[in-house]
Image (cartoon, rainbow, N blue to C red):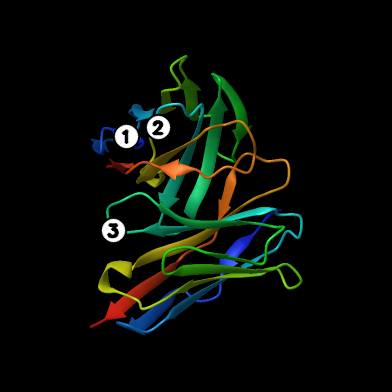
Amino acid sequence: KAGVTQTPRYLIKTRGQQVTLSCSPISGHRSVSWYQQTPGQGLQFLFEYFSETQRNKGNFPGRFSGRQFSNSRSEMNVSTLELGDSALYLCASSPGGTRQETQYFGPGTRLLVL
Amino acid sequence: GESVGLHLPTLSVQEGDNSIINCAYSNSASDYFIWYKQESGKGPQFIIDIRSNMDKRQGQRVTVLLNKTVKHLSLQIAATQPGDSAVYFCASYAPGDYKLSFGAGTTVTVRA
C-alpha cells in the first residue's frame, strides 16, 4: 500500500499571503489529522477529519482551516500568513473507525514564511 | 489537560548497546500509547504501540513497557544501530479524543 502523501513538500511564502496544503491518506483510511511541528512547540494537533466532517479541532486561530473530500483526501489552508506559521505541517491518516488507532504520517510540507 | 513528556531531551549510546527512552504522561485515563521515530527530513514513523490493558509489548528489537501506577512508559531498543539515530516521540490518546498528544521528543545519537 502506498503511504500518506503530501504536496507540496516545500513552500516559501511571504507574510499576508495564504497557502493550501494537500494530503492523500493511505488507501482505505477515512480519518485525516493535521499537525504543526516547530522546534519550540513540538508537534501540535490542528484538526482531524472523518467522512468529510471535522471531528476534532486544536487550539489554533481561525486562520487555519481544513476540509476533507469524499475520497478522503484533505486540504488545509492558512490565510494571512505570519512569520510564526513557518513550520513542518504533517498529515496523518488512520482507518477512522475507533479512537485507538495508529496514525500513519506523511513526510510533511515544510513552509517558510518570509 | 493531557501532558505527555519525555525525561531526557538527548541520549547518546554506543553502537551495539541497548537504549532506553523514557516518557511520563499526566492523564491516568489515557488508554493507548504509541512510540514514533522521526528521522531528519521525514515524518514520524510508527514503531510500536501498547494499550492500557497491557504492561509490555515486544516488536523487532524494540520493547515498550507501561507502568500505569506511576504513569510511565519506556521504549527499549536492543543492540542499537546507527540507523536508530533519530528523534523519538511518545504519544497518547486523551480519553474521548481522536487526537494524539505528543511529548517533546528525545534525540538519540548512536556512536560508532
Give the CA distance from mark 2 to mark 1. Answer: 6 Å
Q: Are marks 2 and 1 in contact (CB under 8 Å)?
A: yes
Give above or below for A92 relative to A44: above
Q: Quadrant of the N terminus of chain A?
A: top left
What chain is tagged by disc 3? B
Give the CA distance from mark 1 to mark 3. Answer: 21 Å
Is residue A2 in view? yes
Q: Are marks 2 and 3 in contact (CB under 8 Å)?
A: no
**In this rendering, do the residues under marks 2 and 1 share a single chain?**
yes
Give SS at disc 3: loop
What chain is tagged by disc 1? A
Label ID, residue B40: 3
Q: Which residue is mark 2?
A: A26
Say which of marks 2 and 3 sits in front. 2
Circle 3 crowding by C-alpha within 10 Å: few under 14, some 14–19, many from 20: few
A61 or B24: nearer the viewer: B24
- Label 1 is placed on what type of residue? Ala
Give SS at disc 2: loop
Label ID, residue A2: 1
Label ID, residue A81: none
Rendered image quadrant of residue A49: top right
Say which of marks 1 and 3 sits in front. 1
Question: What x and y, as percent, mark residue B67?
Answer: 69, 71
